[in-house]
Image: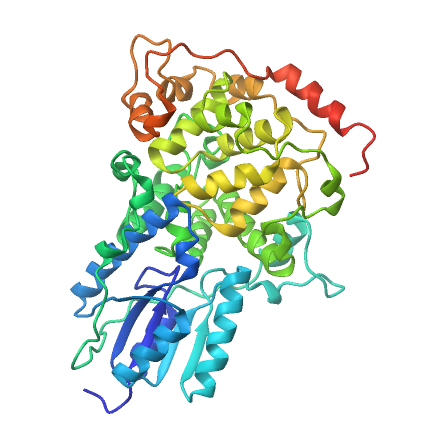
Amino acid sequence: MSNSKPTLVWLRRDLRLSDHPALLAACENGGAVIPVFIHDDTVDALGAAPKWRLGLGLGHLAGALHAKGSQLILRKGDALEVLRDLIRETGAGAVHWTRLYDPDAVARDTAVKAALKEDGVDAKSFARHVMFEPWTVETKTGGYYKVYTPFWNMVKGRDVAAPLPAPKDMPAPDTWPESDNLDDWQMGAAMRRGADVVRPHVRLGEAAAQDRLDHFITHLAQGYNEGRDQPWKDGTSNLSENLALGEISPYQCWHAGRRAMHEGKQGAETFLKELVWREFAYHLMHHTPRILDSNWKEAWDAFPWNTDENHAEVTAWKQGRTGIQFVDAAMREMYVTGRMHNRGRMIVASYLTKHLLCDWKIGQKWFEACLIDWDPAANAMGWQWSAGSGPDATPYFRVFNPVTQLDKFDKQRDYVSRWIAEGRKNVHDDARSYFDAIPKAWGLKADDTYPSPIVPADEGRKRALSAYENRDF
């Protein structure tokens, strides 16, 4: 053992061993390295699916650390109090963590860093959750970017540091501090029976994330420009689940995408643009945190959206029973897999906010409960983009027609037949799984009659445009 004091590595949304500067720096300090995860108020606030998925990720990471001769220490409580307790118990002289950018995390981390430094502890935060930290990207006049394309043009040529290797050795303390039992936290309790349905669709941990990336680059990047819009096929990376918890870093994805672009794979640059779209969401969340809970464009504050979460049309939307096949298929995909194809996300969001004229925050809250790839910045920006109330949003007068969108992107209705059971003789297993995943209280069965549209596509468009008329957005 070195005479150096131990370092605590406070893990949050960075559940991996490679490309982890906070962990690598701790290993280089010379003393023992003690990884810790703290179940604090920010964890309590998570929706059912993301909390469950976080619990799975923690269990998997604990196994990876054990294989390295290390352990993951679990504690529940206020972050500062827990860290101080662990410092007293272990004699740690430093605490490392990876920076997060949502307002609650920033407030917590700022207070923790100041308090620990006052205690004489070396508290350090590191980058890696995003490639371009929000305060490092400015317009020519010194402001922040409100439109994606100029943001992309500003960062696309920047150097992105090469991914870092996993540490070869993780020095262990002579005695490990006590740890909570992960099962006692019951992080999947709110998922109920849905957990068993979604679990086979989860790709858990760092190795699975790297496999996903390799599969995408090898087999799908060439056709990504078209494949990403076709929900019936395997055409995307599906890495959002792993990026959300840091089981893979955006740096690793970026460099793989750059290599593919240099190899001439035509969809690789579009993949890089999607990574930067995620960066743009974090940029906006940092500079305008109101994007998480308020209309980014304040002119929308007076718009008479329906805010009743229990309205019959909202219930039909949540249940995937709107009678609009694209909407219903996408919602059912989410209940079975924990994710939703991006084209589907646009369609269901547009339908809720424009055809049904419901507040985007209803959808944002529902996605936060149901998505295993939930991300605070991406979820908020996506909903406000669809509603028209956000930065660089789809024009408010653009109303996706979910019927013609289906004709364009699912001509043979493969996507629809995979997820909708009602009225079909040969029902796909995934369509049946929907009825196993949803609450029993919904009282739905595969042999129910498929509903007529609650708001037909053309009628909804007219309704939306009428509501927008004579408003200054």
Say if 319 sits above or below 110 in the image: above
Q: Is residue 405 above or below residue 450?
A: below
Query: Is residue 266 shown to the viewer in this render?
Result: no
x and y, in percent, of residue 265 in the image: 45, 42
The residue depicted at 45 percent of the width and 61 percent of the height is 129
Report the residue at 46% width, 85% height from top: 117
Q: Quadrant of the C terminus?
A: top right
Residue 453: tell me if it is visible: yes
Q: Nearer the viewer, residue 395 or 102?
A: 102
The vertical placement of 86 against 295, above or below, is: below
The N terminus lies in which quarter of the figure?
Answer: bottom left
Measuring from the top left, give residue 119's x and y in whole percent.
43, 87
User: Who's the residue at 49% across and 35% down the image?
Assistant: 342
Considering depth in this image, is 464 or 151 the residue closer to the camera? Answer: 464
Q: Residue at x 35, y 16 (%)?
A: 421
Q: Position of residue 90 (x, y in %)?
A: 26, 82
- Residue 18, by quadrant, is bottom left
The tally of labels here is 0
Q: Is residue 351 left or right of residue 161?
A: right
Q: Quadrant of residue 158?
A: bottom right
Q: Where is residue 434 shown, x and y percent of the image?
A: 33, 26
Which of these two is toward me, 368 or 391? 368
Q: Is residue 465 left or right of residue 206?
A: right
User: Quadrant location of residue 399?
Assistant: top right
Its colouring scheme is rainbow
